[in-house]
Amino acid sequence: MSIEVRNEYGTVSISKEVITTIAGGAAVECYGIVGMASRKQIKDGLSEILGKENFSKGVVVKNEDDSIDIDMYIIVGYGTKVSEVAHNIQNQVKYSLKKMIGLDVNTVNIYIHGVRVTS
């Protein structure tokens, strides 16, 4: 499945895997996040932290009616303000997708799947 981006020069087809990789990479750079979590915890392991190659398990891209919605499943660090971490991730993901591929994102939904003590 891919997303079509049209401009005056033509059409560009962007796969959802590219979007999940960019969104996941932008999210893990934010302060307060320990890592990405799998959206299917029972199947993939309870609150397992995903590596770069598995961001697609923790990011869901929905494309309906020319709007793009992203669901992200994360693990935050203990002692951080969860609302601020989520807000920073939302802003960073929207900015990164706009800057890298010119994609306007309607919503970025954050789901907290765990809290870890970071050392």
Image (cartoon, grey):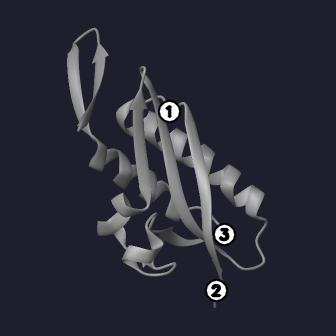
Which quarter of the rendered picture does the C terminus lie within? bottom right
Pointer 3 residue: 32
Pointer 1 residue: 105
Q: Earlier in the sequence, mark 2 or mark 3?
A: 3
Mark pair 2, 3: CA separation: 9 Å
Q: Position of residue 75 (x, y in %)?
A: 58, 71
Q: Position of residue 86 (x, y in %)?
A: 67, 55
Tell me the residue at 76%/57% (across/down).
83
Which quarter of the rendered picture does the N terminus lie within? top left
Name the amino acid type tagged 3: Gly
Q: Are marks 2 and 3 in contact (CB under 8 Å)?
A: no
Q: Position of residue 13 (x, y in %)?
A: 21, 30
Tell me the residue at 22%/12% (across/down).
9
Name the amino acid type tagged 1: Val
Tell me the residue at 35%/54% (across/down).
21
Label at residue 43: none
Q: Position of residue 72 (x, y in %)?
A: 51, 55
Q: Against 27, is 3 above or below?
A: above
Secondary element at tag 2: loop
Left of 49 or right of it: where is 106?
Answer: right
Q: Are marks 1 and 2 in contact (CB under 8 Å)?
A: no
Pointer 2 residue: 118
Q: Against 28, is 97 above or below?
A: above
Instruction: Give the label, 1 or 3, closer to the camera.
Output: 1
Task: Looking at this view, name the residue that lies furthest to the top.
Answer: 8
